Image: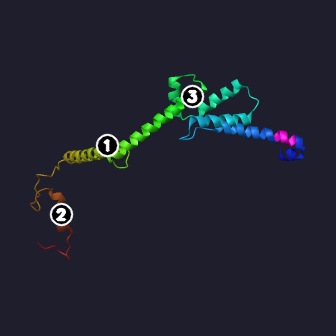
Amino acid sequence: MATYFYALRNEQKSSYEVKVDREKFYAEFENRLLRPGEDPAVFLWELTQLLTRANPSLTEDSKTALLERQFMRGLPARTRLKLLEQDATPSLDAMVSFAQRFRELDTEHFAANSTAHLSTGKNDQPPDMSTLVAAVKALQVEHQSLRNEITQQRQQARPVSATRGVTCYECGERGHYARACQYRQNTSRGTANNPIHF
């Protein structure tokens, strides 16, 4: 494509350059969004400039329709939703004035909340963080109490030894049968060379 372009005569190159510039301006127009803190009137002015450079031969109705669509797309989602709640088909002027009012109210609300937050002297954690910390502590306490309860139930569920009240006939001690007596086992292991003395 580049080889073809450079092989053209200068008069033909200029028409292609205009087309490339127009596509570039139209792409900028399509990608342009309202920047944080930007006045919506400035945003509309820049959109108008980009659209005029992209296609200067547009009729006023076409230009207005494209500007309305891109202005609406360029607004932040929250502003756009509030605008559409108020008026489903707003004009371009109505969009600009609403976006300006909404921006001012949002700025005032943010400033008021920041001042209130600073005046209370709270720490830097968001208010939801303290709620989460309290919930985690409550869960830890509940978890520990459940563990203690399970441990007690396991201890109570252990089977009672059948040899608990049994007395051994070999050694006379309680808690085991004669066949399991260590005294008996020790005496049977003794040999002539190594007798076990009592």
- Residue 106 against residue 191 in the figure, above or below: above
Label 3 neighbourhood size at 10 Å, few (<14), some (14-19), many (20+)?
many
Q: Is residue 121 left or right of residue 175?
A: right
Q: Is residue 19 left or right of residue 134?
A: right
Task: Name the disc covering residue 48, or none.
Answer: none
Q: Is residue 133 left or right of residue 60?
A: left
The x, y position of residue 20, in whole percent, is 77, 40
Please give the name of the residue rendered at 50% of the width and 35% of the height, measured from the top-left corner: 103
Residue 193, picture quadrant? bottom left
Residue 15, picture quadrant? top right
| Residue highlighted by disc 3 | 95
- Identify residue type, mark 3: Met
Please give the name of the residue rendered at 56% of the width and 34% of the height, measured from the top-left corner: 75
Please give the name of the residue rendered at 16% of the width and 61% of the height, measured from the top-left corner: 181
The x, y position of residue 60, in whole percent, is 70, 25
- Marks 1/2 in contact by CB < 8 Å: the verdict is no
Label 2 neighbourhood size at 10 Å, few (<14), some (14-19), many (20+)?
few
- Residue 48 against residue 87 in the figure, above or below: below
